Image (cartoon, helix red, strand yellow):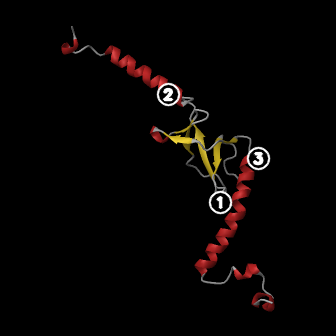
C-alpha cells in the first residue's frame, strides 16, 4: 500500500502538495484540460459561429485568406468567453473559428468587402491599369 493510501489521501490531494506556484500550475493545467473540450462543444452549438479549415494564409493589412474558400478573415480581438468558463459572451456575433492541435479555439471575423481575395486582386489590378492608362507617355518613349 502506498503512503497516500495509508494516510487515506486521494491522488488528487497529491496535486495540492508543493509550493503555491507549483500547486497553482497543476490546478490550472487540470482546469484547462476540462475547459478546452467544453469550449469546443459550446462553439459548435452556436449557430452564428462557423468552424473553418485552418488553411489561413497571411496577406497584407493583417488579413488571413482561406486557401480553400478564398474568403478573407481578421483575428477577432474581443473577449469571447465569460471569464474562465465555457459560457460564450458574444454568441450574437458572427464568428469563424479554428480548433488547434491543442484543442484551443482561435476566432476570426470575416471581411465582407471585398468578399474574396480574388475580388480584391481583381479590383487592385483594374485600378493599376486605369492609373497607367491615364498617365501620359514620357517624351523619351514616344516614337
Where residue 63 appears, x then y in whole percent?
Answer: 50, 39
Task: Give the residue at x 58% y 34%.
Answer: 71
Task: Determine if residue 26 is in view.
Answer: yes
Which residue is nearer to you in this view: 71 or 109? 71
Please tell me whether residue 14 is drawn above or below residue 68 in the rendered image.
below
Name the outermost residue toward the top.
143
Please tell me whether residue 75 is drawn above or below residue 14 in the rendered image.
above
Which residue is nearer to you in this view: 118 or 93? 118
Mark 3 or mark 1: whose residue is earlier in sequence: 3
Task: Determine if residue 86 is in view.
Answer: no
**Residue receiving disc 2:** 120
Where residue 11 appears, x then y in whole percent?
Answer: 75, 80
Q: CA distance from mark 1 to mark 2?
A: 37 Å
Please tell me whether residue 124 is drawn above or below residue 35 in the rendered image.
above
Task: Give the residue at x 47% y 23%.
Answer: 123
Of badges 1 and 2, nearer the viewer stands 2
- Which quarter of the picture shows residue 126? top left
Mark 1 Cα shell of 10 Å, populated few (<14), some (14-19), many (≥20): few
- Which quarter of the picture shows residue 29? bottom right
Q: CA distance from mark 3 to mark 1?
A: 19 Å
SS category of the residue bearing label 1: loop
**Residue receiving disc 3:** 45
142 vs 116, left or right, is left
Q: CA distance from mark 3 to mark 2?
A: 32 Å
Please tell me whether residue 10 is drawn above or below residue 133 in the rendered image.
below
Mark 1 or mark 2: whose residue is earlier in sequence: 1
Q: Are marks 3 and 2 in contact (CB under 8 Å)?
A: no
- Which quarter of the picture shows residue 39? bottom right
Q: Are marks 1 and 2 in contact (CB under 8 Å)?
A: no
Where residue 92 appears, x then y in whole percent?
Answer: 69, 43
**Residue receiving disc 1:** 83
Amino acid at each position: 500500500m502506498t503512503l497516500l493510501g495509508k494516510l487515506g489521501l486521494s491522488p488528487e490531494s497529491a496535486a495540492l502538495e508543493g509550493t503555491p506556484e507549483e500547486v497553482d500550475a497543476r490546478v490550472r493545467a487540470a482546469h484547462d484540460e476540462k475547459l478546452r473540450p467544453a469550449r469546443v462543444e459550446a462553439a459548435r452549438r452556436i449557430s452564428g459561429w462557423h468552424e473553418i479549415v485552418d488553411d489561413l494564409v497571411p496577406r497584407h493589412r493583417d488579413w488571413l485568406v482561406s486557401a480553400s474558400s478564398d474568403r478573407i478573415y481578421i483575428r477577432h480581438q474581443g473577449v469571447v468567453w465569460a471569464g474562465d468558463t465555457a459560457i460564450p459572451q458574444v454568441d450574437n456575433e458572427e464568428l469563424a473559428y479554428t480548433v488547434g492541435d491543442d484543442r484551443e479555439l482561435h476566432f476570426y471575423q470575416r471581411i465582407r468587402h471585398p468578399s474574396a481575395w480574388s475580388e480584391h486582386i481583381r479590383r487592385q489590378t483594374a485600378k493599376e491599369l486605369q492609373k497607367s492608362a491615364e498617365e501620359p507617355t514620357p517624351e523619351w518613349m514616344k516614337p
